[in-house]
Image: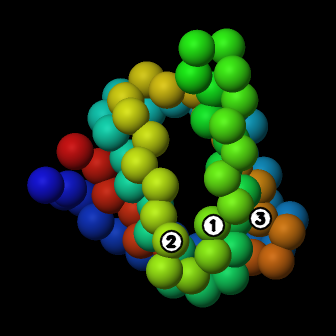
Amino acid sequence: GYKDLYIWQDSPNTFYDWHTHPNDEIRYVLEGSTTIKVKQNNLIHEYNLQPGQFIEVKSNTLHNAYTKTGVKYVCGSK
């Protein structure tokens, strides 16, 4: 299961440039929306997440994130 669960909030127009994490990561949207792009096998997949939706990004996977409206979400790693 996931550990280190916490709630995170980003202001409108927050952008996180391409990066990785050493563990599998999950983001579950509570309020607002966010767009997360994940690069796998030289392809970029774009996920537009709304409240009630989540994404799991595997360890060491290159990704970025942007919120136009602001977002509040649950974060976790395993």
Foreground: disc 3 or disc 1 = 1
Percent across and percent down for residue 61 are 49, 26
Percent across and percent down for residue 7 are 42, 75
Instruction: Check if mark 2's residue and mark 3's residue have beta carbons within 8 Å.
Output: no
In space, the residues marked 2 and 3 are separated at their CA atoms by 15 Å
Alpha-carbon distance for marks 2 and 1? Answer: 6 Å
Relative to 70, residue 64 above or below = above
The residue tagged 2 is 53
Q: Are marks 2 and 1 in contact (CB under 8 Å)?
A: yes
Q: Please name the residue shown 62% across and 35% down the image.
A: 38
Residue 19 vs residue 55, the one in the foreground: 55
Query: What numbered label is drawn on residue 67?
Result: 3
For discs 2 and 3, the disc positioned in front in the rendered view: 2
Point out the tag, 2 or 3, that comes first from the N-terminus. 2
Q: Quadrant of the C terminus?
A: top left
Query: What crowding class fits label 2: few (fewer than 14 Cα within 10 Å), some (14-19), or many (20 or more)?
Result: some
Q: Nearer the viewer, residue 78 or 40?
A: 40
Secondary structure of the residue carrying numbered label 2:
loop
The Cα–Cα distance between marks 3 and 1, rounded to whole angstroms, is 10 Å
Query: Which of the 4 image quadrants contains residue 10?
Result: bottom right
Coloring applied to the structure: rainbow
Residue kind at label 2, given as amino acid type: Gln
- Residue assigned mark 1: 49
Look at 37% across and 29% down and name the residue there: 59
Amino acid marked by disc 3: Thr
Q: Mark 3 packing: few (<14 Cα in 10 Å), some, or many (20+)?
A: many
The disc label shown at residue 60, or none: none
Badge 1 density bin: few <14, some 14–19, many ≥20, Cα 10 Å: many
Q: From what the image shows, is residue 66 above or below residue 6?
A: above
